[in-house]
Image: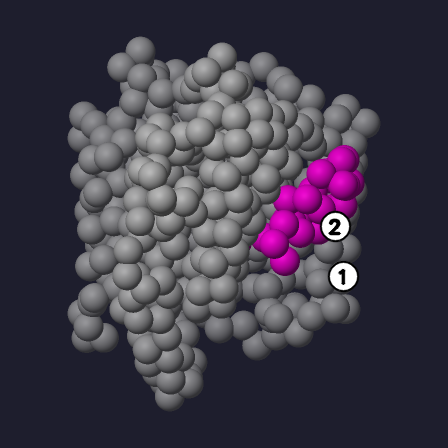
Amino acid sequence: MVGQTRQTSLREVRKALNANPLNPYVHIFKQLLENGKNGPLKGSAVARARFGSDMVLLKKQIAFNTEAQKNISTPEKVRDILLRDLATHKESSDAPVYSPIVDPHTGEWAMPADDEVAAKTLINGLLNKNYKTMGWIASLKSPVLDSMSTWPDYDKTHISQTGMETCIMPNETRINLQHQNETMAYINLLVGEIVWMIWPPIPDNIAKMQAAYDADANAKPEDPVGVNDFDDVALSLVGGVTCVHAPGEVLVVPPFCMMLGASTRPTAFVRYGVFQADRVVPTLRMMPFIKSWWTMEHLNQETRFSFAAALADTIKASLSGVLDDVLPEQFAVASAQRGERLGLMGNLVGNWDGVKDGLVEILREEHAEELRKTAKEFLGKVAETSWMCAICGKTPEEGVTMEDHFDMNHWPQGSLEIGYNEVEHGGQADDNAEAADQMEGVEREQDTREQAGPSTTTTLPLRQVSSNANILVDTEQMEGVEGAGE
Ligand SMILES: [Zn+2]
């Protein structure tokens, strides 16, 4: 399952880019290779250090075992699986899967007369290495591949996993600059070839990306939108690593990395994301960035709330002793013995004051209250043996209960902050966007598409755990996670 990692050299990337000089997306890659800020995936120690312990990896066959690999070993077999997935999708949903793309040469949209026909034609196009069209399938659920996959081993730290989805692109398609969401992405190429550039989520890069999201969110309708603005951002990012992604290889992309891709052949890949317990605190620290992205994407309030609720559920599960191998009443002794190695529970307690505001701001009020209750219960249980506050280490003054101490010192002050989205960015902005969508109809939809471009970033709410129940080996455990506080 875990294969050898492969190194990619600049020579290999240049060869892939030079194979088709007419590919309109080759230009930006050449600029990125020549601006002195990026290098090959087979990078220097400095380049690797920028990614820290979460380096981008290119591996062989991580998502499928040898037996399953036979079922996707040729473009014909992949095509057949995708056609089955398409048929399954069409049986159960009216939602279109095929998205038109603006022709970079003419600036025109290629709206398909029939979504299903266009999708089938594109999938069949995987057999023709020069096949081009102005559209793609950004995301098609793949129950067939789900059923064949081998998943990372489940353990207590493995909180959720998204189902497998495929992306199908004709030759010369670009995946616009975007960030990977809070999950670790596993992108398994099935057919074709993609050249990638992936940047580390270092503060400088994150700040540039966030500024671009904010500028885009505040752009007026008459402002020019689209890919060129983000090309400027891509050219300003530092520490990118480039590679050529070939069939049978899995690209592992750590959370919040920025990425840009271009197909150099008709290409299909399958991807899924894994969210682990040690990502809860780093994700909370990224809330300002995530909020900027939400605003740009006009993400609706319900999706925001469910993302926040899923995070809060995970935190409640941890503070209740469901996720870690330590119960709250054992916390004081365990933290003295193990220090920072005390899993999510220790991580949360150690960082509570720094991340609480960002989370509470985005929670629905009743979910915030549930979290507050769980946190107080946790502190109460810890104090039974240690007589002090687990978060700050102080013993409340005479006459002050631990609950009051928590409210006064470790909970956002002032009720206005709760329901941040409704009060400030909230409901109002979204309602306006929705109303505008309805008024402007298709035209507006096209604008949004052009602005967002082909995208693999979904920042799925964590609650949308995989459709594949098999990954949840320990069902009881996951019910604890999912069900806590519901
Ligand atoms: Zn305290």
Task: Kindly tell me whether residue 306 is visible in this rendering.
Answer: yes
Asked whether residue 309 is drawn in magenta, I would say no
Q: What residue do we see at 76% from left, 35% from top?
A: 473
The quarter in which the C terminus is drawn is bottom right
The picture places residue 294, in percent across and down from the top left corner, at: 36, 59
Residue 214: % across, % down = 23, 58
Q: Is residue 26 left or right of residue 467?
A: left
- Kindly indicate the quadrant of the structure image that contains residue 22: top left
Q: Secondary structure at mark 1?
A: helix
- Residue located at (76% from left, 45% from top): 469
Residue 64 location, x and y as percent? Answer: 71, 30
The quarter holding residue 261 reads top left
Q: Is residue 443 above or below residue 311?
A: below
Whether label 2 lies within 8 Å of ligand 1 gets the answer no
The residue carrying pointer 2 sits among few (fewer than 14), some (14 to 19) or many (20 or more) residues within 10 Å by Cα, namely: many
Q: Looking at the rendered structure, which numbered label has been put on residue 143?
A: 2
Q: Is residue 174 left or right of residue 94?
A: left
Residue ID at (50%, 39%): 380
Q: In front here: 439 or 262?
A: 439
The answer, for residue 450, to whether it is visible in the render is no
Please tell me which residue lies in front, 32 or 459: 459
**Which region shows up in magenta?**
460-486
The residue labelled by disc 1 is: 88
Residues tagged 1 and 2 counted as in contact (Cβ below 8 A): yes
> Which amino acid lies under the numbered mark 1 shown in the image of this protein?
Thr
Q: Secondary structure at mark 2?
A: helix
Along the viewing direction, whichever of 201 and 381 lies nearer the viewer: 381
